[in-house]
Image (cartoon, rainbow, N blue to C red):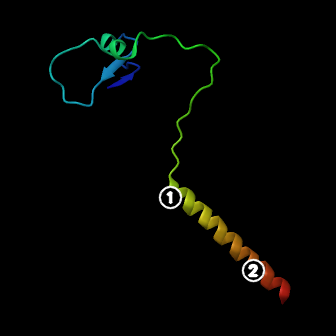
Amino acid sequence: MFLSAPYDVDAEYEGYSCAPYTGTDFDVQATVESVYGAGYVPEAGGTPSIGVYIDKTAVIGGVAAVALLAALGWFGWKRRRTT
């Protein structure tokens, strides 16, 4: 189930389900509160959480590219210096 701010209705939130629609309406707030308890307003000034996804293959590829460029630069500098 997904809860989000509503786009075109006068409500605090809307609920969506991944499953096919069964044709029966249910009270989203009551369902969520039965599982997670009553909601509350967060305290002001808290630390925001940011979800960050890092692709390991991109990081490994980036590190390998930087290492390769550094090695080529070092060999080029050393070659130029010895001639």
Q: In the drawing, does residue 10 fall left or right of residue 83?
A: left
Taking the image as shown, residue 54 lies to the left or right of residue 16, namely right
Q: Secondary structure at mark 1?
A: helix
Task: Give the residue type at disc 2.
Answer: Gly
Query: Where does residue 18 sit, x and y in percent of width and height?
Result: 27, 31
Determine which quarter of the picture holds residue 38: top left
The picture quadrant where one finds residue 26 is top left
Q: Quadrant of the C terminus?
A: bottom right
Residue at screen point 66% across, 68% down:
67
- Asked if one can make out residue 8 in the rendered structure from this viewpoint, the answer is no
Considering depth in this image, is 4 or 34 the residue closer to the camera? 34
Say whether marks 2 and 1 touch (CB < 8 Å). Answer: no
Dot label at residue 76: 2
Q: Which numbered dot is residue 57?
A: 1
Q: Position of residue 68 (x, y in %)?
A: 64, 71
* Picture layout, residue 46 above or below residue 49: above
